[in-house]
Each structure stands twice: as C-alpha cells, then as structure tokens.
Amino acid sequence: MEAVVVAGIVLLITLLLIGNASGKKKRPGRTGNRGTRSVGSRPSPQLPPYETGVLPDRLGLLPDVPLHGTARRLERAFDAGFGSQLKRRVLDKYTRMTEAEYDYKLLELKRYLLMNAVLKGVPMFSPEVDDIWHEMLMFTREYERFCEEWNGRTVHHAPHGEAEPMPGERAWFDWVYSQLFVATPYSGRIWRGFFRYPLDAGLLQSLEREAPETIAEKRFSGASAQTNPETEQTIALLIRKAKEQISQSKTAPAANGTIPGTGSPNARERWQDRPDSSSAYSGTANFAMLGSAMLLFSMTDPTGYEQQMEAIMPEEEKRNQSSCGGSSCSGVSGDRRDPDSGDGGDTGGSSDGGNSSGDSSSCSSSSSSCSSGCGGGGD
C-alpha cells in the first residue's frame, strides 16, 4: 500500500513539473499578432539603451547622393504635417520607448520612405520601424498630404500573406542602403543586422550585363524618376556604382581582402582605422565600403561569403547580427502594388502589454531576410 502511495506522489510531482515546463514554452514572444508585440525596448546585456545624440542632417545621405533636396522636403513636410502628434501617439502607446529610441527609429522610417522614391520594391525588414509606420498611417489625411508634398504620390502600406524568407531582397536592400546613407550607431540594430546574405547571382548578372535603362526599368521607380530629377540622378548613380564595383571585383581577388574602390588588401584595418571628419558617428565612416565588400564577396566567393564578411565586420555589427532576427513588410509608392514586390505576413505592434521588446534579447527568431508583408515600390 505504501508503495502505491509513493508511486502516486511521484507521478503527481512529475505531472506538475511537466505542466510548469509546458507553461514556460508557451510564454508569448514576438509574433505576427498585432496584440502581442511591443515596439519599445528594454535594455539587455547585449543591447544597451539608446543614447541621445545628434541626428544626421538630410537623413544622413552620403555627399554624392543627389537626394538632398528631396530629403529636405520630406523633413519639412513631416514637421509641418504631424510630427509632434505622431511622437506623442507613439510614446503614449509604447511606454517603454525613450525619446532617443523614437528619434533613431523615426529616422530609419524616413530613410525607408525615401528609398521608396528610388526603388520599385522596398521590403521592410524592421518590425519596430513598421510599428511606427502603422501609427503614422492612423493620421490618414495628414499622411497622404505628407507623401504628396515630398514624393508626389502616396507610399502605400500594403500587407499581404504569411512571412517568407527573402535573402536576395534583403541583400539588395542592404547594398542600396549602404550606398545612400551613413550608418548611425543604431542603424544595424534597428534593421536586425546588415550584410548577412550575398547578393543574388541573377541580380549580379543583370547589373553587369544589362543596359542601365533596362536595369532602371526592372529595379527602380520610373514614376518618381519622371517627376523628380534627383531621383533620376540617384538611380543612375546606383547603377553606375554597381557596374563599377562589379568590374573592380573582377581584378580584386577575394582571398586578399581587397574591397572594390579601395585598392587596399587591408580591409579590416581600413574599416576600423580610417578617419572621417564629416561623420558624427564613430565606426560608421566606412559603411559604404562594407557594401562594396558585400558585392565583391558575392561575386568572387558566394559559398564562403559569410566567412569573408565575418573577417572584416566590425564587432558592433556582429552583435547586431547575433542579437535579433527580423521580418519584412513593404510599401508601395503610387496607386498600385508592384507585382514583383515581396510577400509576407503583416507584423504590427501592440501597446506595452507584450512580453517581448523590440530590442531586448528576446528578439524574433525569424531570419532577418523574412518578409513580414507589405509591398514596396515606386511604380
């Protein structure tokens, strides 16, 4: 009889332990459900809090990028339209978000919108930036006026199906971003790490062999180019840079670490040590060089791409890559969605009740190449 009682007690304890373990596994984290995710960040050992800093002028465009006038129009239209209302709405909803975090994430949203004026398809690879975009869309009339004033057409948020990996589109996004903007100390963190994936072989072949007009029609926003000379010039600049970097990669062996446009085999040292007096951010002066290295290794050593980039990647960017996954949504500039834009499940934000934080150590387990699902593009 005693043996039966003891066995029963052991069984009961076992069931309780299993139940507790099961409950822990079911603890909610970041999901596509708009009611479970918080955009505000909680500091973690891997990711320190955002610090107040001086944001770059004209959205941090590189000096040779012709979009400076467009960026100024975007900033003016935003401030005049609903800047203060949006900030109050977001900070009231996401109570863990600091003003510094909001400012840096808003900067990345403005950059994303500017990229929509240039590219035909722009997946959104930051759920936290997408959350702020969703809040911006709540000001429907103001948002439409804002887009019309700087872009001539609305950048539409177009959610579609379930999340799906888009490593090729993510690589293209990273390369274009690196050729347009200087990175802030938080850009990689917000976009879930740059340069994880090599550029697609088919895209590289297209960029190398096809005429600029053909490339522009396939990949860039023709509608914006027709109405905005700065967009047209920027498209031409990006195509020219891609062709030049591809040409240089033919004579720059990946094994010696040479990066197109630098002529130096000491890629790591050039990244870490090269001064840049015009940059307000330490460690970001050579961000465009990393984009060039990305293209080089995609061309010369696609199977060893990860190891090649690892050798020259700054420690800060390595931390960004290891701390978070990512998802994607995209926007459509104009009145219709581009049929080639990426698909995925829409990921919105929640108020502060979610267990998972945008920049905490419990980031999404999904890949940074996944599309969370809003289409992006110009035509």
Image (tube, grey):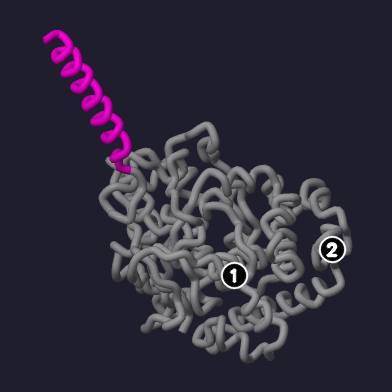
Where, by quadrant of the figure, is residue 208 drawn? bottom right
Q: Which residue shows up at 35% across the image and 58% down it?
A: 347
Looking at the rendering, the stretch of residues picked out in magenta corresponds to 1-28
Say which quadrant the N terminus sits in.
Answer: top left
**Label 1, label 2: how far apart the Cα atoms are:** 21 Å
Secondary structure predominantly adopted by residues drawn in magenta: helix
The percent coordinates of residue 333 (x first, y second) are 43, 78
Per the image, the residue denoted by label 2 is 262
- Of circles 1 and 2, the one toward us is 1
Q: Which residue shows up at 39% across the image and 76% down it?
A: 154
Q: Secondary structure at mark 2?
A: loop
Residue 346 left/right relative to 198: left
Does 28 sit above or below residue 375?
above
Where, by quadrant of the figure, is residue 329 drawn? bottom left
Front position in the image: 25 or 175: 25
Q: Secondary structure at mark 1?
A: helix
The percent coordinates of residue 73 (x first, y second) are 52, 70
Front position in the image: 61 or 267: 267
Toward the top, the furthest residue is 2
Amino acid identity at mark 2: Thr
Q: Which residue shows up at 74% across the image and 62% down it?
A: 293
Where, by quadrant of the figure, is residue 183 drawn? bottom right
Q: Which residue shows up at 48% across the image and 80% down it?
A: 378
- Tally of marks: 2
Q: Is residue 341 visible?
A: yes
Front position in the image: 28 or 231: 28
Label drawn at residue 172: 1
Mark 2 surroundings within 10 Å by alpha-carbon count, few (fewer than 14), some (14 through 19), many (20 or more)? some
Asked if residue 197 lies in the magenta stretch, the reply is no
